[in-house]
Image (cartoon, rainbow, N blue to C red):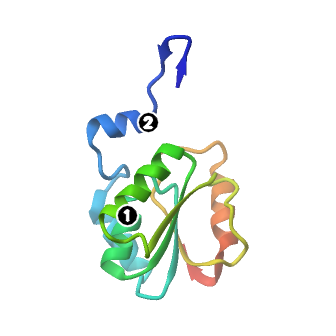
Amino acid sequence: MKRKGLYKPTVEDAIEIGGIETLHPGGFALTKRTAELAALREGLKVLDVSSGRGTQSIFYAKKFGVDVTGVDISEEMVKTAADNAEKAGLSHKVQFMLGDSQCLPFEDNTFDVVISCTVGIPDDSQKVLQEMVRVVKPGAGF
């Protein structure tokens, strides 16, 4: 954020500078294991909460054939994620949108699976969990 000639680096800046592709502990091994535990398969509708650059969402769509919606609070991350999905040829399977994980912009019971591999701690992590439960279909996974 630029303010009167001063620049305060953001998490997004650190990720971009560092070239980090995955931001959560465990990397792609954890991403793959999460997908397996959630029994991801073609036809499922998945929400990736705090999707960042879209790396996990794109992986889920490519390897498991699911339709993914990624939501992130950072406009820069949403744009980067959408660009990454387009470069991967998966824009038809992966969508990204701006949203707050503490107040997800979806109706109740919308998704078959809700996944979040966030590193940042939101203001109210309990609210994030409540929102994830609210938007996942009864009997589904998250």
Residue 70 position (above or below residue 53): below
Q: Residues within 10 Å of mark 2 (few under 14, many from 20)?
A: few
Q: What's under tag 1, amino acid-wise? A: Ala
Q: Does residue 84 show up?
A: yes
Q: What count of labels does the image hold?
A: 2
Q: Which mark is residue 85?
A: 1
The residue depicted at 42 percent of the width and 83 percent of the height is 39
Q: What's under tag 2, amino acid-wise? A: Val
- Residue 121: give x, y in percent of width and height: 54, 44
- Residue 51: give x, y in percent of width and height: 47, 57
| Circle nearer the N terminus (2, 1) | 2
Question: Quick one: quadrant of the C terminus?
Answer: bottom right
Query: Is 130 positioned to the left or the right of 42 in the image?
Result: right
4 and 37: which one is in front? Answer: 4
Find disc 2 in the rendering and name its residue.
Answer: 11
Q: Where is residue 101, by image quadrant?
A: bottom right
